[in-house]
Amino acid sequence: MHFYCIAGLSVGSEIALPGLNAAASDRGTPDVMIRGRAVQSAFVDATASGPTWQIAGEQFLLRIPGVARFLLTAGNEIAFEAEPGADAGDIPTFILGTVFGILMHQREQIVLHASAVRVNDRAILFCGPSGAGKSTLAAALSQRGYRLITDDFCTITVTSTGTPVVHPDGRQLKLWAQAIEKLELEESRGERVRNRLEKFYVDPGEALVEALPLGAVYALREARPPLVPGIERPNVADAAVLLRRNAYRPRLVAHLNQKVLYFHAAATIANNAGIFHLNRKLDFAAMPEVVSSLERHWLEIGLMEKAA
Amino acid sequence: MTRRIWLASYPKSGNTWLRMLIANLAAKDDQPVGINDLAATSGIASARGPFDDLLLIDSGLLTHDEADCLRPRLYEELARGADSNEGDPREAPPAVRFIKVHDAYTLTPLGEPLLAGARGAEGAIVIVRDPRDVASSLASHRNTGIDDAIAFMNDRDAKFSANPAKQDMQLRQKLPGWSGHVASWLDQTDIPVHLVRYEDLQIDTAAVLRRALEFAGQAAADDELCRAVRFADFTRLRQQEEEKGFREAPPQAGARFFRRGETGAWRDELKPDQAARIEADHAPMMRRLGYELSHTADLPTAPISLAR
């Protein structure tokens, strides 16, 4: 059995999950168990479904053709059965890249499609759809000394005192070959994420363990006309929509009846931290300017202090 | 139920102009629809966001071929009304939804139509333009020389968004040469096709637009047609781009999306040998579409084979 800590949850897994840091095994029953066993191909009593997935009560079935079928139960078990001809190495990749995000939705967590870095003991999130540049920006910021908290999805919990916090998961960055080259990260480049992809794990350095209060959420947008580069603060109503649209899988927020949950979270985050648009050119040459505009913004909103 | 109609074209063939004309049929308060408001109401078939959101699988973890195998499921789901869920529930869904597509009409590695055949849409309006005019426009759009554009238009393996070392905002689109692309749409037998020549749209915009709308099953009153033609006049579109920029414009500085929009501009933009090369590459399809050849000697007349 392998043990990990993902988004603040203890995880026991029959298979090794590359790209994660191992955790101590003496923490009692894990919050989430990952195991291989027979998984049905469909529910007979599905209450909601899509082309690749079904929901029936506390159970969620996802089929990734040619890889595996995954059965998620009550947010605390992921069972998987490989499809014929599957590359066994792909199963952990999809567990971490897709299935775990869905599990967090199933656990009624606020889970955003986001990467996050640490700025002065606060978590700064960058969210956007696949291809928006979340991981690349997080990589550039970690090169500037801001430690990586999480990549791809990011879970926010609200403490009993009403503070939104983010749990690091010790996951490695996943970057495409071009980003690794442009950011000169060849030395930190690890294994391929999948054998057939030019996408690699990149070691972000020492892993963070403790949860951090949320400092700010930025939704990434490409600065194409009429949008100009810069940071904007949407009004509260727009911020609520923005947060839901940047859920890991917005469709599931609707299917799992969590719109109210996200609405309240947006209000809490807007009050405690701040939700912003970050418009910038999708061009590596613009990255230094993006980083300095963020640093100016962190000074402005009090996340960083001016150098003496 | 909303009827789904593809607006299918090789790039730089007038797809956006036709979309602007259609969008302006519903112009409110006698104000032209902004060129940057287009994306909000009608996306492109190859957008990555709906794939991840509806199939729940991270398309960034899939190879292009794996994503292609799943794309028919996406269009079937959209045809079942999945894209109306996120809209304003108080607004009635449109009678017809037009969806831009640059993909050729191809089969997936599993042998299904990529765009899900009759389960994905009820028909296609196929827009074609003289390939000699396409060449100079494509060169400007891709920031290459005209010779490169001519080679791209004659490459049976040409693609958009296919760089394996990075992830584009869009899924891969196969563009198997200009002739192959047009043939793939005109010769498929899954869904009815209505052919629109860019040149005819220019000569009698209102009449050509009316016939295309009739094919799609959308009624339009004479005054709406006239207003749409006036609002989406090429000069006005170019003026909008000059004033505010266009989000779909090529990123390089000074590049324009709405460039000249003229028929026959190739006569002063192409060298004679360049025009001759395009005619040699595409003579059968040019003849089939009624584009007059200037170099008629020794050109092949064999029919174009199906590009699948």
Image (tube, rainbow, N blue to C red):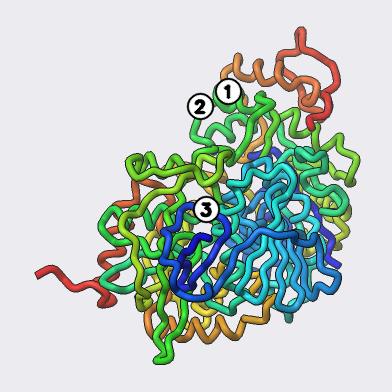
Asked whether the residues under the numbered discs 1 and 2 touch, taking CB atoms below 8 Å apart as contact, a structural biologist would say no
Residue B95 visible in image = yes
Provide the chain ID for the residue under circle 1. Answer: B
Mark sitting earlier along the chain (1/2) = 2
Spot occupied by residue B142 in the image (x, y as percentages of width and height): 53, 36
Secondary structure under tag 3 reads loop
x 66%, y 49%: residue:
B46
A39 vs B92: above or below: above
Give me the disc on residue B145: 2
Mark 1, residue position = B270
Q: CA distance from mark 1 to mark 2?
A: 11 Å
Judged by depth in the image, the label closer to the viewer, 3 or 2, is: 3
Secondary structure under tag 1 reads loop
Give the residue at the far bottom of this rendering: A161
Residue B235 visible in image = no
Q: CA distance from mark 3 to mark 2?
A: 28 Å
Within-10-Å neighbours for mark 3: few <14, some 14–19, many 20+: some
Mark 3, residue position = A131
* Kind of residue indicated by mark 3: Gly
* Kind of residue indicated by mark 1: Leu
* Kind of residue indicated by mark 2: Gly
